[in-house]
Amino acid sequence: MIDRRTFGKTLGLSAGGAVAATLVAGPSGTAQASSGTAQASSATARQAGPAPASAAGPRGRTAFPPLKTVRAGLLDIGYAEVGPERGTPVICLHGWPYDIHSYVDVAPLLAAEGYRVIVPYLRGHGTTRFVSSRAFRNGQQSALALDTIALMDALGLEKAVLAGFDWGARSADIVAALWPERCKALVSVGGYLVVNLEANLQPLPPATEHAWWYQYYFSTERGRIAMEDKDKRHDLTRLVWDTVSPTWGFDDATFERTAAAFENPDYAAIVIHNYRWRLSLAEGERRYEPYEKRLAARPVITVPAVTLDAECDPFTVPGNGTAYRDRFTGPYDHRALKGIGHNLPQEAPEAFAQAVMDAHRL
């Protein structure tokens, strides 16, 4: 577990400052800090208004229960919670351009098996907000991973099963690699997704580069302006959904439910910085340099892990997991899902939930 004083210093908090504070719903349903502070290990969260407007998805589930918000490090994190409070905690982390609804069908499956499922909005998404208006809107990998640690501390969770895809898998991988004492088990779609900035400077095969078109678009001012424009952002993210999940028969309402999370005022800034940072076109923050140096060495993951590859995901690395097998040195299983695209938890919730349970039992 990260030392409290060190963690507070890393996040720019005073040594005596509380990491977590109870939040209550404001008059408009937005979360506001209540008076007083609470210690991270005993922090509680109250409901912060209803979940975003729901629409029946392809499997018939309409919405999460009312969302909660908790003060966690640099953020007031909005999250959904399903299942018994005393159950083994599972934190499900979404990717881009997605939101918590990637797990709207996974969560009840795990809750029915006795798990406490927590699904947070990543920074820049949905109801998650920065505490300070002056904070740098940083999308680099270690910053997002530390958000997960901060959430666990705020909820008093010593350890949790971590599961994710895309940005979420990267954060889960990093926590498992750098802080294995906080991770009971890991489920990672796409395997080992830790970014190596030096390696990222090298060109990939043309077909792979083609799938990353938006990464290069976001490196331009045209791309930044598009992400800040509501209509262009909507159409761009919808195009990504269509192209990276070619076999998923989602309807318009399913996309619109998630697209509501992209109206977060920090969304464009976080997305643009994330992709520019990966290409070494934007600087990170000095406070995260020690973690990035450790990640550059590609640390192995020792906790029990299940990796998932999706056949129709253009970002799936060829080789059925062999490309990253050496990064997982603990109990391990790998699975390939035929006919499934990038948003694996929402496209194949039963298989994802089973992977979580199996990883926990490894």
Image: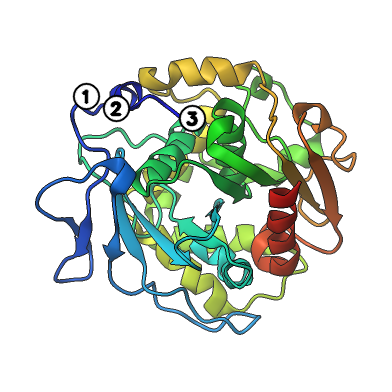
Residue 7 location, quadrant: top left
- The numbered mark at residue 269 is none
Q: Is residue 161 left or right of residue 311?
A: left
347 with respect to 63 (left or right): right
Give the residue pinned by disc 2: 8
Along the polypeptide, which appears first: circle 2 or circle 1?
2
Residue in the foreground of this view, choosing between 326 and 19: 19
Question: How far from the left and from the top, in percent, is residue 133?
Answer: 20, 41
* Residue drawn where x is 68% and y is 55% of the image: 356
**Which picture quadrant has residue 305?**
top right
Task: Say which label, 2 or 3, has the lower sequence index.
Answer: 2
Q: CA distance from mark 1 to mark 3?
A: 21 Å
Residue type of the residue flagged with mark 2: Gly
Q: Note whether residue 250 is visible.
A: yes
Of labels 1 and 3, earlier in sequence is 1
Q: Is residue 234 left or right of residue 294?
A: left
Dot 1 alpha-carbon crowd within 10 angstroms: few under 14, some 14 to 19, many 20 or more: few
Q: Give the crowd class for mark 3: few <14, some 14-19, many >=20 residues within 10 Å.
A: many
Look at 66% across and 42% down and name the residue there.
212
Q: Nearer the viewer, residue 248 or 164?
A: 164
Q: Say few, some or many: other residues with alpha carbon within 10 Å of mark 2 (under 14 / 14 to 19 / 20 or more).
A: many
- Amino acid of disc 3: Ser
Q: Residue at x 78, y 62 (%)?
A: 340
**Label 1 near label 2: C-beta < 8 Å?**
yes
In the displayed structure, 95 sits above or below 101; it is above
Q: Which one is in front, 104 or 224?
A: 104
What label sits on residue 142 in the rendered view? 3
Residue 28 position, x and y percent, is 18, 71
Residue type at mark 1: give it. Answer: Ala
Find disc 1 in the rendering and name its residue.
Answer: 15
Q: CA distance from mark 2 to mark 3?
A: 15 Å
The kind of secondary structure element at disc 1 is loop
